[in-house]
Image (spheres, helix red, strand yellow):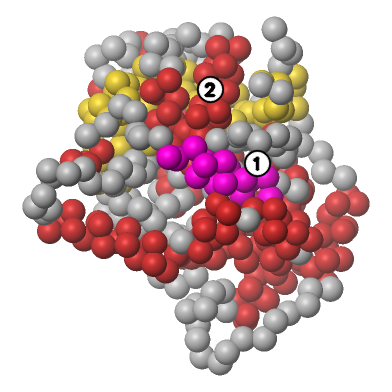
Amino acid sequence: MTAITPFRIDIPQSQLDDLHDRLDRTRWPDELPGVGWEYGIPLNYIKELADYWRHSYDWRVHEKRLNSFPQFTTEIHGQNVHFMHVRSANPHALPLIATHGWPGSLVELLNIIEPLSEDFQVVVPSIPGYGFSGPTREKGWNVERVARTWAELMSRLGYTRYGAHGSDWGSAITRELGRIDAEHAAAVHVTMIGMPPQPGLEPYTEEEQRRLQHGQRYQRELFGYAAIQSTRPQTLAYALHDSPVGQLAWIVEKFRDWTDSADIPEDAVDRDHMLTNVMVYWLTGTAGSAARLYYESLAARVRPVEPSPTPTGVAVFPKDLSLSVRRFAEAANTITHWSEFDRGGHFHAMEQPDLLVADIRGFFQSLPEISRSSFRSRP
């Protein structure tokens, strides 16, 4: 069996000095007057944020927080896999693997790890190609391959029965994990389950039509990043790998477009938390390899969706980039739990961690096949 090795984040000061030097030498573009966010991130906003990043943000504070969680690496299918593994005080707690998405990282899940560990043995990996898992080294790292890697990881940790949660790409990976490893995956919980409407479901309800229109707006106005990453991730990598402000803008724009924010991303998420997520991409040099997941998964998307027999819970947040429709999802999934919330956007664990934790806990606690001893008693 391949070894599981303890891991600790220790970024050399030279990397931080290089970042500061690059920020000091940023070559700023012009912008049209009075367009706000219509053409992308406004110049005055990104300048102020970059100045804060350069002079006020303290990586060492957040590095220390990251290192407060036990971390490990192991090699699976020839790829380094980095993960956090936080054991519950409850020896009967159900193992739970939680997966981030793009432009997130395991940083986006930090606020839910401790509360989940009251009832779960929590495993939070970095997707191959992301963060401290490092760049992928060969073609073929798509959603299915990541899911098979997670199945092997949970087996390697000695977990023969487990649950899974995911958002964004993590939702797709988690659904696939439940499908391919149904023998061991007791149930899965996701925040997006994008299934197109199947023939024969017409007429659509007013709410279903609204959600379809929401998806059409995403395809029309907000899909540009995905089109580039699905077709030319290497070309994009040169800009993001070389320019910290380029990396900052590419990610932070999504925290404005996809969150339940009134004007700027910080209306919905903590500024330092968001910058720590950006730092993980910058310090590990994984902007390009993270984008490759889009290319690889698009290439594999020609196959029809295969049904999943695994009990599936879905949490829908109103300002997410995609709003799932239960009738569509039920066509190929075993939906046993469906929650609709009145607030929150795409970065659920950062925006509404309490709502998300309660929904994950409630879903698994409701399943008859999950032992009641897995959950601590509450008044």
Q: Residue 41 carries which label?
A: none
Q: Classify mark 2: helix, strand or loop.
A: helix
Q: In this view, does 16 lie above or below 32?
A: above
Query: Is 335 placed left or right of 171 in the picture?
Result: left
Query: x, y (%) of residue 215?
Result: 32, 58
Q: Position of residue 288 (x, y in %)?
A: 68, 50
Amino acid on which the number 2 mark rests in the picture: Arg
Observer-nearest of 333 and 202: 202
Q: What stretch is highlighted in magenta?
A: 287-302
Report which residue position mark 1 lands on.
Answer: 130
The N terminus - image quarter = top right
To which residue does mark 2 refer? 148
Three-letter amino acid code at the position of disc 1: Tyr
Residue ID at (53%, 22%):
148
Any magenta on residue 76?
Answer: no
What number of labels is visible? 2
* Number of the front mark, 1 or 2: 2
Q: Residue at x 30, y 37 (%)?
A: 314
